[in-house]
Image (tube, helix red, strand yellow):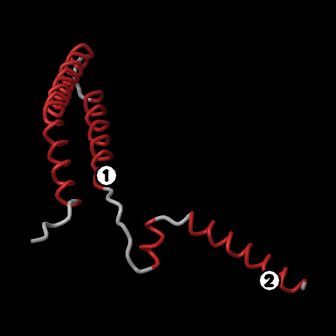
């Protein structure tokens, strides 16, 4: 009698642990087990680091350039103004293009999700 109770209790514990481990699985875990994996793209991060390095280098070059302080400050202010204007223009363009891009993504996702026409 106790052996059936212990087997039942052991089965219940094992089942609950199995459910917990399955609940914690993610898509990457399953793909990795079968030899597939999603590859993470580091392109944006690398470009960001390159851009930050270029900005730091440009700043150091401006500060160490052989010119008067007032000229250097004027040049830095002018370049920062150009960067600000370019950023504002890029954001304005992105804001105008966002609705079209969103509509394009919606149409593409609807085309992928909808079942093929059965004839």
Neighbor class of circle 2 (other Cα within 10 Å; few <14, some 14-19, many 20+) is few
Q: Which mark is residue 7?
A: 2
Neighbor class of circle 1 (other Cα within 10 Å; few <14, some 14-19, many 20+) is few
Disc 2 secondary structure class: helix
Count up the numbered dots: 2
Contact flag, marks 1 and 2 (Cβ < 8 Å): no
**Nearer to me, 18 or 59:** 18
Q: Which mark is residue 117?
A: none
Give the side of residue 24 with respect to residue 71, left or right. right
Q: Residue at x 23, y 22 (%)?
A: 76
**Nearer to me, 57 or 107:** 107
Distance in Å between CA atoms under marks 1 and 2: 56 Å
Residue most toward the left? 119
Height in image: 14 above or below 83?
A: below
Give the side of residue 67 with respect to residue 28, left or right. left
> Which of the 4 image quarters holds residue 90?
top left
Where's residue 6, x and y in %? 84, 81
Q: Which mark is residue 46?
A: 1
Where, quadrant-wise, is the N terminus in this rendering? bottom right
Where's residue 116, x and y in %? 16, 67
Residue most toward the top? 70
> Which of the 4 image quarters holds residue 96?
top left
Q: Residue at x 68, y 69 (%)?
A: 16
């Amino acid at each position: 009698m106790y052996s059936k109770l212990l087997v039942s209790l052991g089965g219940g514990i094992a089942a609950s642990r199995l459910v917990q481990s399955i609940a914690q699985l993610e898509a990457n875990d399953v793909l990795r087990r079968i030899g597939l994996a999603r590859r993470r793209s580091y392109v944006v991060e690398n470009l960001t680091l390159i851009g930050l390095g270029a900005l730091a280098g440009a700043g150091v070059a401006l500060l160490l350039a052989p010119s008067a302080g007032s000229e250097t400050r004027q040049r830095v202010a002018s370049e920062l103004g150009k960067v600000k204007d370019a950023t504002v223009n890029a954001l304005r363009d992105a804001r105008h293009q966002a609705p079209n891009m969103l509509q394009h993504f919606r149409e593409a996702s609807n085309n992928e999700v909808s079942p093929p026409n059965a004839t």
